[in-house]
Amino acid sequence: MKKVVVVGSINMDLVTMCQRVPKAGETIFGDRFFQVPGGKGANQGVAMGKLGTKVTMLGKVGEDSFGNDLINSMKNSGVNTDYIERSKNSTGIAKIIVEANGQNRILVVSGANMDVDKEYIDRHIDVIKDADIVVTQLELPLPTVEYVLGKAKEFDKLTILNPAPAEPLNEKIIRSSDIIIPNETELSFITRMPTDTDEEIKAACEKLLDIGVKELIVTLGSKGSLHINREKSQFHSAYMVKAIDTTAAGDSFIGGFVKALNKNNIDEAIEFGTKVSAIAVTRIGAQSSIPTLKEVNEFQGVKRS
Ligand code: RIB
């Protein structure tokens, strides 16, 4: 079985559900509050673990109860947490507001995630050497992301970058990523090009392909996703579902994609990831919304035309 390592963020999500977000200076009542394990890296790791992938998480939490809960959530989902370290800084948190239409707004305080440095990666470099696929995002310090991707390529691993939240990226990061999975906004940000139409998205992807990326998968929310490489551009439509909470929609897509990924079956893997995220958006929370393999296999969704 292929081995995956996710090098990424681990956050406790503090979620408020409400009809609408308050305006500046306004106080309104929310409907519900809860805390739930999250963090883009951990969510992707948990999705892979729940779906039966052999996955190890590299990252840091604080010496606090959020850290304990987050490690337990990952362990219970089948993620190897042996190399997660405790930092003096508190565990990362994300304040999330979800409106009645399922859309969210997220404010992250990184805490321990910002202590994931090159020295930490070097201490656990054997985990990267031992993996087949290395997955990372941008909720860690950028020099660490660059280092991880560079090392992974040095060891000839397949590298997957989810450039979220969007940050300007240097060419080395882009060149070291075999597959980049942004949404349209992130694609626009990292290429500094407009991405409002299919043609603009393709042009922005061309720019990344010219730098050395092999495959781009641009997620388009409720519309679906676009897979672009040198040979082709293929649209994958999404399922028609009633979204309650879109938090971790992208993370569950990536978890499903990696679970189903074998050599040269990118479009099949996208279809599987699309199903996983279709289920996730119908449930509340980040890791709490991610389905098991059985649930995905039993899913009977109808695609948008
Ligand atoms: O992608 C969703 C995640 O982004 C949330 O779980 C939150 O922790 C932020 O990292």
Image (spheres, helix red, strand yellow):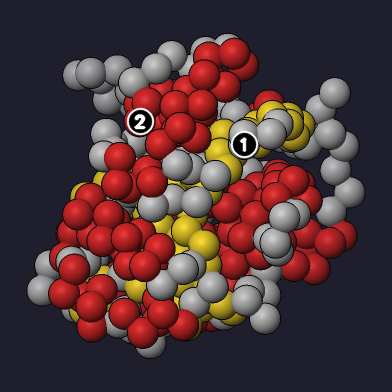
Task: Give the quarter of the figure containing the C terminus.
Answer: top right
Task: Give the side of residue 223 with respect to residue 166, left or right.
Answer: right
Residue 17 versus residue 206: which sits nearer the camera?
206
Residue at screen point 46% across, 68% down: 156
* Residue position for label 1: 229
- Describe residue 133's horizontal placement relative to residue 89 as left or right: right
Residue 214 image label: none
Closer-to-camera residue (60/117): 117
Circles 1 and 2: CB atoms closer than 8 Å: no
- Figure check: 177 above or below 259: above
Q: Secondary structure at mark 2?
A: helix
Q: Amino acid at mark 2?
A: Ile
Q: Residues within 10 Å of mark 1 (few under 14, many from 20)?
A: some
Q: Quadrant of the N terminus?
A: bottom right
Of marks 1 and 2, which one's residue comes earlier in the chain? 2
Q: Nearer the viewer, mark 1 or mark 2?
A: 1
Residue hosting label 2: 190
- Tell me if residue 48 comes above or below residue 206 in the rendering: below
Q: Distance of mark 1 from mark 2, alpha carbons? A: 17 Å
Query: Quick one: 97 or 209, which is closer to the camera?
Result: 209
* Residue 49, percent from left and from top: 59, 73
Residue shown at the point (70%, 50%) measured from the top left:
266
**Crowding at label 2, few (<14), some or many (≥20) Cα neighbours within 10 Å?**
some
Residue 45 position within the rendered picture, expressed as x and y whole percent measured from the top left: 50, 66
